[in-house]
Amino acid sequence: MRSTLVVAVSALALFGAAEAAAQAAKAPAKAEAPAVNPTIRQPGWKTPRTAWGAPDLEGYWSNATLTPLTRNPRLTPKATLSAQEAMQIEKIWAKALADSDAQTDPDKSTEQLQAEFTQSELVKIRPDFVAAGGDVGGYNTFWIDPGNHIMEVNGEYRTSLLTTPNGQFPPRKAGAPTSGMNYRDSYDSYEVRGTGDRCIMGFGRNAGPPMLPNGYYNNNYRIVQGPDSVAIQVELIHDSRIVRLNGKHRTDGVRPWMGDSIGWYEGDTLVVETTNIPEGQALAGAWKNLKVTERFTRVSDTRLNYQFTVQDPDVWDAPWGGEYNFYPLNGVIYEYACHEGNYALPAILAGARHAEEQAAEAAKAKAAAPAKGEAKGKKGAD
């Protein structure tokens, strides 16, 4: 795990972007650009084919990256970075990870360790790591595998995976419908907890569609092709999406997890169209009439370009989307045994019941307090 989104680098490893640019200006980068850029389709390169003639997309892939889903305008308004800026950011990030990986002092208290973690360079770059690794029982850096590089697409170092003009989600229509599901503050039952807590689906839209890196770990995939279908296995929560080739969308009203995906080939590209996405997988509130179109294209032996387009006429005025490159996973996908040793769900519910008991006792004590005061006053009068 340690070597592998976003979601999202909310504070981006553009930590000190201005400083990084200044450092880059003082001294040229020592590393030279490779003679062949693996992210750009090279003239004369031919897409490999399966035995039945389809473009060969099979293999183990990863989309872990330092580039966040949305651009952080406080750090940079630019859509792309120079190669020197990207390298400086990656160096800062690598050092922050190494510092955070240092051996923990066994003589320090939990409170001291938490305070140090929240003040670390790692958290300055990724403030959201506090929620993942700062609390008791949370993940420490050893278990976090967020990616090590700024996403490079067609020779450009991107500052967001979204390709909208400002790198943000487009504005929603006034009065646009939203998903009615709110897992975050629901503690009544396991049935109303999030799909990640219940080991049903991964967090951060790894499985998609669209398929997005979650920024923490398990951003790995396996693609298997057949003449009539394509299977996309997702490491996180062991999801597998089946794309039916040259088929039609279901009309029975059933909304399976990851939606209903059909696909076809356009030259060297696999096009996947997904509808019937369940409310539990709403994207920015859109789900009922949400349609996601994905395009998978091999651009070199080591890169698989991924583009997605999102549209829902009830929520947005126009389609929007994003782009990134998958790169080969150095290994294979192993079983994600989510429920083995998983005490999170019973602990969450037990904590909620305990909080309710405390609130009930406090309310009872408060209700009894005036009665005691009245009794004391009456005794004094006698």
Image (cartoon, rainbow, N blue to C red):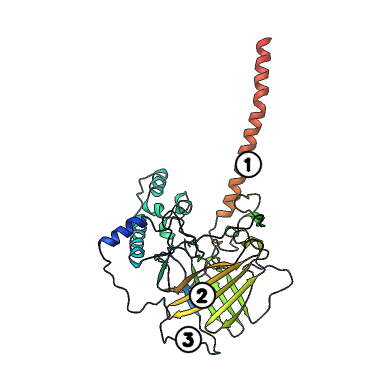
The residue that label 2 is drawn on is: 222
Q: Which residue is mark 3?
A: 48
> Is 78 situated left or right of 373 in this image?
left
Mark in the foreground, 3 or 1: 3
What amino acid is found at the position of numbered circle 1 in the picture?
A: Glu
Question: Distance between the Cα atoms at labels 3 and 1?
Answer: 60 Å
Q: Residue at x 45, y 66 (%)?
A: 64
Instruction: Identify which residue is drawn at 66% across, 23% down.
Output: 370
Q: Position of residue 274 (x, y in %)?
A: 63, 72
Q: Nearer the viewer, mark 2 or mark 3?
A: 3
The answer to whether 247 is drawn above or below residue 282 in the figure is below
Q: CA distance from mark 1 to mark 2?
A: 44 Å
Q: Quadrant of the N terminus?
A: bottom left
Distance between mark 2 and mark 3 Cα atoms: 17 Å
User: In terms of secondary structure, where does tag 3 sit?
Assistant: loop
Instruction: Give the mark nearest the N terminus, 2 or 3.
Output: 3
Report the amino acid beneath label 2: Arg
Label 1 belongs to which residue? 356
Q: Amino acid at mark 3?
A: Pro
Residue 194 seen from this side: yes
